[in-house]
Image (cartoon, grey):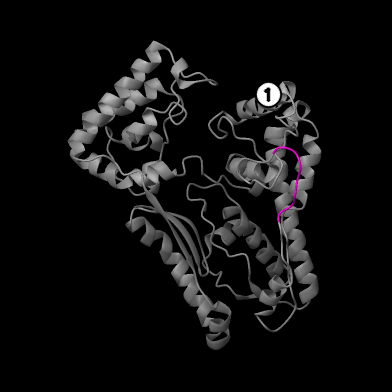
Amino acid sequence: SFLLSYLTGCAIKCIQDKNGEIEILDIRTDRLLDWIKKPRDEPNNPMIGSLPNRFQATAPDPVGAAEAAAEAVCDAWKKIKNAVYDTYVKDIVNYGIGTKNIWDRQAKSFWEISWTVDSNIDSINYRKNWRSHLPPVEGGDHCTIMGDWQEISGFIRSKNRGTKEKQDLFWRKLREGTGGMDLREGERLCSISLIKRMFPKVSKEAIGWKVKAENWPSTAYVAAIPWLKLAAERVPNLLCEEYARCAMNSASDVSREGISEKVGISSNALTASFLNLDGNFYFMNAIENCDRTPLKGTPREGDCRDESQETRLARDRLKAKLRDMKDKAGSPPSSFYGMLIMDGDNMGSLIREKGTSVSVALGKFTDSVHKTVRDYNGITIYAGGDDVLAMLPA
């Protein structure tokens, strides 16, 4: 959603540079558009999508402005995809078979950009209904996230043992380049999924500022938020600190510094490290699962039962300390979370009836969403126009 909002913002900026005026979207206070116009790397960089993927504008040369805006979107996307490719794929492309061709085929043709020149706001809706867009039918092994797209190694693992081993080697090399935590064991991605996954790590090169999404709350963390607030109040601070130290000594890359601030949980010197752990470390069943909580002695591949006795003892210590914390808090954390999806109906008719005042009202609504969701222990993923997407604990 952030990438789509960013590309929309690039189109809007281009229209304005062509002396155009944005009619439908109140963009006067949009922070993302402000950063697109003037990129800077500051602590409060925008990282939530806030621009919907449609807008209405006027321009002295509407056709020329629309064509330039479409080109601006393509140029911005090219910079993003190239930043990911050059950082993570370029040096291992020889471990794949046809990887560069797969990448170019998928990434170059992914976006469909439509525009119409008309006085009727519904004309773009009619244009949308003229076609039926279907995902491509691609051969080879498919992406584990976007199942219609081919994964980029190019190997077919069912062919024989040799191709399976080559495919595994390709993804092992790619995982090593990402640091390991951004690409899980068994994940094999198409170019689009990999761009979405790794974009935050190269965002400074791609768009001009750092999108700090590495400590974005996971679904497990969001589910645990009410319990974390309860634990911070009821569990002795020293016990919180001991559990965090045990987790960080037992596992690599388990700290998510700053994540509690994103969701509005207050902390002190002793509770801060506990409240900034990977979300899986708050759940007993996750600690029992070595795939969800790999420790320093967990084998990179193979069965969890292959863990050494020392690693199993470390896992038992974590479970014992977490059990003690749950007793002190009075309850365990819930593992359930909800997705809040909002989409206004018949907005075109409302805008025709009420004019640009609707756009102004939607702008005010968008500005208020983040605080409202946070008041209910949630995380806003996207808020733009009449659309909202957020995660909240059940």
Amino acid found under the numbered disc labelled 1: Leu
Q: Residues within 10 Å of mark 1 (few under 14, many from 20)?
A: some
Residue in the image at 79% along x and 46% along y: 105
Look at the image and give the residue range highlighted in magenta.
135-141
Label 1, on which residue? 169
- Position of residue 352 relative to residue 185, above or below, is below
The extreme top residue here reads 309
Q: Is residue 242 visible?
A: no
Residue in the image at 58% along x and 85% along y: 352
Q: Answer left or right for 22 relative to 260.
A: right
Does dot 1 land on a helix, a strand or a loop? helix
Q: Answer left or right for 207 relative to 311.
A: right
- Which is more toward the observer, 96 or 371? 96
- Which is more toward the observer, 186 or 9? 186
Dominant secondary structure (helix, strand or loop) of the stretch shown in magenta: loop
Is 64 in the magenta? no
Residue 297 spot, x, y in % from top left: 45, 16
Quarter of the view holding residue 116? bottom right
Residue in the image at 64% along x and 62% along y: 8
